[in-house]
Image: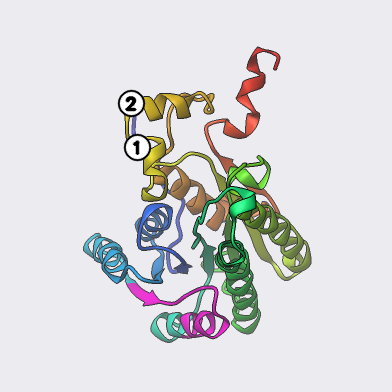
Amino acid sequence: MAPATLPSLKDQVALVTGASSGIGAAIARAFGAAGATVAANYRSSQEGAEEVVRDIVAAGGRALALQADVSEEDEVRRLFDATVQAFGRVDIVVANAGIQQDAAFADMTLQQWQRVLDVNLTGQFLCAREAVRRFDAQQADPRISRARGKIICMSSVHEVIPWAGHVNYAASKGGVMLMMKSLAQEVAQRRIRVNGIAPGAIRTDINTEAWATPEAEQKLLKLIPYGRVGDPEDVAAAAVWLASDQSDYVTGTTLMVDGGMSLYPAFRENG
């Protein structure tokens, strides 16, 4: 079977937050392979982001690593300024940066609650708001895309599945979902498309304990009807499609990339 052909993002500039590892790194590499110029944002792992950039450049693309904490308004503005200064414009923004700080609800500190909301929800708000401002200010170019701009909000299956012990994380992702939909409704008439991706269990460093041993993986697979743990490249392929003109009539939608986890597999045997 011939390998799948990626949709084209040729001549577009994409800013991917949290691109130094995991899902963000896979998206940045996939965007580069699809022809986009990539601004790979990181907060602390400069080495990881620069490795992603080297991979994109080695494959013939253009990329730049840019540091910023997406929970800080001034840093987000500087991140977009640096992207535009380097590449002239921005056409695609993937608000991917996110964290977990888990605790039982009664033991969760205000700092744990606030930090997760600051990065996962407020950070996406700041990036999406700045993206809309930049899209509105720059000249649309129908030669490269039918849309004026594209925003992809990285969510989680836990925007719909409750998650005991992770209340701050689930609350942040539920907020991302309705922020994304409300924003999509507001800006669609300006030909700005806003969508979300909700990954399920993906093999990344943040959840290594959940899949690293055969015993852990078998326990996890009980929650995944499709029978395998996802790879970052599964999410990256979805992001490329949502950023491309192949999905031009899609806005305000969350694409579940979860092997069926959000289908509540415990009910397969009638509950």
Determine which residue is flagged by label 1: 3
Q: Give the answer, above or below, for where 72 lies relative to 35.
A: below
Which label lies toward us, 1 or 2? 2
Q: Residue at x 59, y 47 (%)?
A: 104
Answer left or right for 20 relative to 175: left
Front in this rendered view, residue 122 or 180: 122
The reply to whether discs 1 and 2 touch (Cβ–Cβ < 8 Å) is no
Q: Give the answer, above or below, for where 221 lies relative to 85.
A: above
Outermost residue on the top side: it is 269
Badge 2 crowding class, 10 Å Cα cut-off, few under 14, some 14 to 19, many 20 or more, is few
Q: Looking at the picture, which amino acid does disc 1 mark?
A: Pro
Front in this rendered view, residue 99 or 247: 99
Q: Position of residue 20 (x, y in %)?
A: 35, 63
Q: How is the image coloured?
A: rainbow
- Range covered by the magenta-colored residues: 64-81
The CA distance from mark 1 to mark 2 is 29 Å
Task: Work out which quarter of the rendered image holds the N terminus and state it.
Answer: top left
Give residue 37's quadrant in the image.
bottom left
Q: Position of residue 103 (x, y in %)?
A: 55, 51
Disc 2, SS: helix
Answer left or right for 73 relative to 22: right
Residue 146 visible at all: no
Question: How many numbered marks appear?
Answer: 2
Determine which residue is flagged by label 2: 214
Badge 1 crowding class, 10 Å Cα cut-off, few under 14, some 14 to 19, many 20 or more, is few
Judge whether residue 79 is colored magenta.
Answer: yes
Q: Give the answer, above or below, for where 233 lies relative to 268.
A: below
